Image (tube, helix red, strand yellow):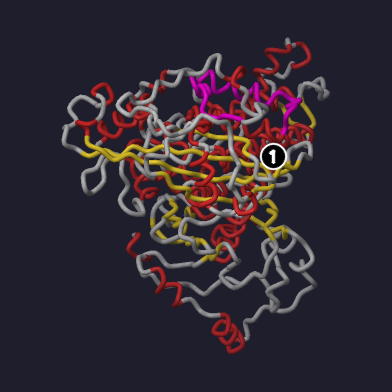
Amino acid sequence: MVEAVEDFAEVVDKVQTPRDQTAAEDATGTAPRRRRPSPNLLLQETVPMTVLAQDPSVVGPQGPVRALIPVPAERLQRGPRGHRFHVVDVDAGTGRPSPPVVLHDDDPWVYRDRWSKQRHPDATTLSQDREFRAQNVYAVAAHTLSVVEQYLGRPVPWHSGAPQLFLIPQARVEANAFYSRQHNGVLFGWLPALAGRPALYTSLSYDVVAHEVTHAILDGLRPRFAEPGLPDQLAFHEALADLVALLSVFTLEGVAADLLGADHGRVRLDADGIAATDPDATLLTHRADALMRSPLARLAEQVGARGRPAGADPARPPALRWSVLLQAGTAWKKDPQFAEPHRRSEVLVAAFMQTLVTMWAARLQELRTDPDGTLDAGRVAEEGVKSAQHLLGMLLRALDYLPPVDLEFADVIDAVLTADRRLAPNDDHGYRDAIRQSFNRFGIRPPHHHIVDADGTAAPTHELAADGPVEKPALAAYPPDPDAGSFGVRYEHLNLAVLRTSPEAVFQFLWNNAAPLSVDVRFPTRVERVLTSTRVGPDGLVVTEILADYTQSLRTTVGDLPPDLVPAGMPADDVVEMQGGGVLVFDQFGRFRLHQRQPLLEAGRQKRRLEHLFANGIRAKDGTWGAADGDGNPRLFARLHQAARDAEE
C-alpha cells in the first residue's frame, strides 16, 4: 500500500488550503463556535494536549488512559502543522487526502483541546475520531522531538534537510508503521474492525509514534548508521527508538501512577504482600520483578495483540516487545535469532530497562510500607519518574559521543559513561555503576579505549581499561605516516572563532594534529558536520561544546588486504570499502577536550565487519562490499519491519 502515497508532493498539494476550508465552513455553517479563552501560544513555552498515554487497549476506570502531553508552543496551522511536523491524512488505497484538522477556533495562536476529560468525558470513542488521531500523532511526535532536543542542547535536523517531517496517520492497511526517507515522513498503518476485534490505528499508540519519530531523529543525527556496517549498528537504531518510547512516557504527568495499577492511591509491588518480614535483598527482587511486569515496561500492547501467535500463553500480557524480561548472559552473541536487528536490539533495551527497575526499586527502600504490603502510589511513581528521566538523559546526551560509523554496543556504553561524567562528575546515586554492571551481565564492556579525553576527567583509561576488550593492532600492510609529526596538540595558525562552524577549520586542526590524535590523514578524510551544543546536567552544571564528526574511507580489492582479515571464500578481485571516523569535542573557547575514535585501520573491527557483510551478502549495486548506494536504501526501515515480522512467523 505504500504506492498509494508514492507521489507525496501531489497529495500534499491536494490538501485544502486554509482559505478553502474556511470558505467551506462558512458555506455550511459548521465553523466552530467561540468558547471561553484557551491557552494563548504566545504566552507560554508549551501547551498541554490530550493524547492516549499508551494505546486504546491500555485502560483504566474511565476507559483508555489519557494524558496531557506538553508540546512546544507555536503557531498551529491546519493539518495540524507546525514548523517541524505536518500531519497529512491520506486515505490508504485511494490516495485522497482528508480535510486538514483544525486545533484552534479562528486564531492559530490560541489552541483549543476538544478531547480533554472535561470536554470529552467518554474516552472509549476517541479511537474512532479521525481528528483526535491527528492531534495524538502530532502531539506525541512533537513532544518526542522536544525531549531529545532538550537533552542534546540544540535543534535536530531531518535527514532530508527539509524543516518539516510528514506524519501520515492512515498510510497503509496493516498493523505496522515505519519511518521513510523516501517520503520524508512516518507512515502509520491501520486495520479495520474484524472478527470481534476493534479497529487498530498505530497512530494512536504512544510507543509506536515515539519509536518511529526517534528513527527519523537518529537518521538526521547519524545518517551513516543506515549504511552497511556491523550488526549492532541497525540494532542500535531499534534499541534507541524503543528506549525513547519506554522512558519518555515517564515525562507525562500522572501516567506512571495510572499504569502501576494504583487502588485508592496505594500500590502493591511485593509478590507475597509481607514486605515487613522480607529481607532487603528479597524485597528488592520482588519489587524489581513487579516493576518489570507493569505496562510501563511493555511496548505497543495493541499492536502486539494483533500479531499474537496462536497458542500463546494467555496469562502473558500482549506486547510487541517486552525486552526487560530478557535473561542476562552472553548466549545472544552466538544465537542466530539475534542477528535480526529488532531481536538484537532487545539486548541493549534489556540492559537499560533492567537498570531502571533496579534503581527504581532501590529508591523505594525509604518509603513506608503499610501492614497490608502496599505503598503510596504517588511516591512510587515519583521515584520511577526520577530514575527514568535520569537514564533517558544519559542515553540521549551520549548520542553526540557515538562514532559516526561502524557502531558497536561497546561504543554505546563507552559514550554513555563519558557523556554523563562530563555533566554529572559525582554520580551520587550510582547510575553509572548500575548501568555498567547491567551491560557487563550481557557481556558488553567499554573498548580499550576509543574515547580519549585531553584532560583525563571524562574518560580516564585506568577506570575503563581493566576489563575492556583490547584493540587489535592496526593493519600491518599500511605503515605509519612518516610525516605525521610528534608534537603535542597544536593550535598555531588556527582561527578558534571560525572553528565553531567551519569544517575546513576542523580539518586544519586534524591535519596539524594527526600524530597526537592518531588519525592518518593520508586516507580520504571528510569533516561532515560542526555544531555547538549547550547542555545542563542534573545538578545544574552547564557545559557548552563544539562537536565535529569526521569520516575516513579505504577502497581496495580483497587481494590487497592482509589474508587474516579476509573471510574464507571472498573472491580476491572483489572490491571492499572500509570505514573509520570519530568525533572531536572542543570546549566553548575552541580548546580540544575529547576524541571518540573509530580507527580506519583497526584490524579487529574491520575483520568483524567484512565477515558480517560477506555472510549476509550485503553489498552495493556495483558489487562493492561495505559501500552504500548513493543516499542509501530509502525503504530501509520498512524492510527492517517486514523482516522482523517474517522472523516471528
Q: Which amino acid, mark 1?
A: Ala
When the figure is inspected, residue 12 is found, relative to residue 203, above or below; the finding is: below
Residue 454 % position (x, y): 62, 31
The boundaries of the magenta stretch are: 424-453
Neighbour class for label 1 at 10 Å: few (<14), some, many (≥20)? many
Name the residue carrying label 1: 256
Is 546 left, or right, of 628 in this rendering? right
User: Picture coordinates of residue 413 (x, y %)?
Assistant: 55, 28
Q: Name the quadrant containing residue 545.
A: top right
Task: Examine the structure image and report whether residue 425 is included in the region drawn in magenta.
Answer: yes
Q: Quadrant of the C terminus?
A: top left
Please give left or right for residue 578 compared with residue 458 in the image.
left
Q: Secondary structure at mark 1?
A: helix
Residue placed most toward the observer, 238 or 500: 500
Judge from the rendering whether residue 62 lies leftward or rightward of residue 395; answer left or right: right
Return the x and y of residue 8 as percentages of the image width and height: 40, 68
In which quadrant is the N terminus drawn?
Answer: bottom left
Q: 267 or 76: which is nearer to us?
A: 76
- Is residue 63 something that shows in the picture? no
Vertical arrangement, residue 590 with respect to residue 277, above or below: below
Q: In this view of the protein, can residue 435 be seen by the observer?
A: yes
* Up-down relation of residue 96 to residue 378 (above or below): below
